[in-house]
Amino acid sequence: MIKKIISGGQPGVERAALDAAIKLNIPHSGWTYKTRRTDEGILPDKYSVKESAAVNFSDRIEKNVLDSGATAILTHGSLTIGLKIVKDYAEKHNRPYLHVDLNENPLNKASALIRKWMMNNQVEAIYFTGSKSAGGPNIKQEVIQIIESICRMESEQEKLPDFPEKDNPAQS
C-alpha cells in the first residue's frame, strides 16, 4: 500500500507523483534543490519537500532514496545518466528499485508491475522519479494514472483479503 510518496519535484515524473499524492490525499515529502529551484523555475510551496543544503545533484537523490523504502523509475526509453545515478544509490543502500519503460509497457501493465513489485518488497514509502516533461508527450497524466491505478488495486485487494497477491515461491 502506498502510505507515502517521496519525490524531489523536478518536472516530469517527480512533479506528477507529487500532484498524484495531493490529488489522492497521500502524504508526501522529499528533497529538492536549495531555494526549491527546478528545471522549470521555483517549486511551489504546496509541495511538502525539504531543501537540500548541498547544491549538487546527487545529494538530493541520495536523500530521496534513503527516505523511501524503494524507488520506481518511470521512463520513456532507457535510463539517462542521472537516472543511472538513482539506480546506483538504490543498489549502494540495498533499496529495491524498479525501472519501467513506458514505451514498452502500457499503463495498466506498468501499474500492475509496480503494484506487484511493491507487494513483494513490502513497500509503503516509494520514491517516484524518471523522465522529465520532455520524456514523453503526456508523462504527467501517465504517472497520475499509474498511481491512481495502484491505489485502486489496493482498494480492491482490501475487499478480497483471502486473495494471495504476493508471490509464494513454495507454490511454484
Image (cartoon, rainbow, N blue to C red):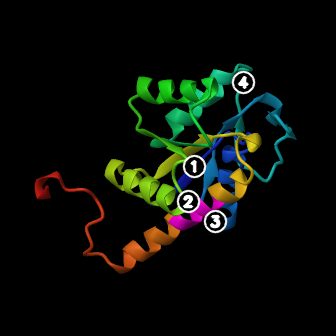
Q: Quadrant of residue 157?
A: bottom left
Circle 4 sits on which residue?
53
Magenta stretch in the rendered image: 144-149
Q: Quadrant of residue 83?
A: top right
* Up-down relation of residue 21 to residue 76 (above or below): below
Find out whether residue 146 is within the magenta segment. yes
Circle 3 sits on which residue?
25
Q: Observer-nearest residue: 128 or 83?
A: 83
At label 1, counting other C-alpha atoms closer than 10 Å, the crowd grade (few under 14, some 14-19, many 20 or more) is: many
Circle 1 sits on which residue?
102
Is residue 113 rendered to the left or right of residue 58?
left
Cα distance in 3D space between marks 3 and 4: 28 Å
Find out whether residue 159 is within the magenta segment. no
Cα distance in 3D space between marks 2 and 3: 21 Å
Query: Residue at image x 51%, y 71%?
Result: 152
- Magenta span: predominant SS is helix
The spot of residue 99 in percent (x, y) is 49, 40
Give amino acid for label 4: Ala
The spot of residue 116 in percent (x, y) is 38, 56
Circle 2 sits on which residue?
107
Give amino acid for label 2: Leu
Q: Secondary structure at mark 2?
A: helix
Is residue 159 rendered to the left or right of residue 3?
left
* Up-down relation of residue 155 to residue 169 (above or below): below
Cα distance in 3D space between marks 1 and 4: 33 Å
Counting residues from the start of the chain, the first of labels 1 and 3 encountered is 3
At label 2, counting other C-alpha atoms closer than 10 Å, the crowd grade (few under 14, some 14-19, many 20 or more) is: some
The spot of residue 148 in percent (x, y) is 58, 66
Counting residues from the start of the chain, the first of labels 2 and 3 encountered is 3
Give amino acid for label 3: Asn
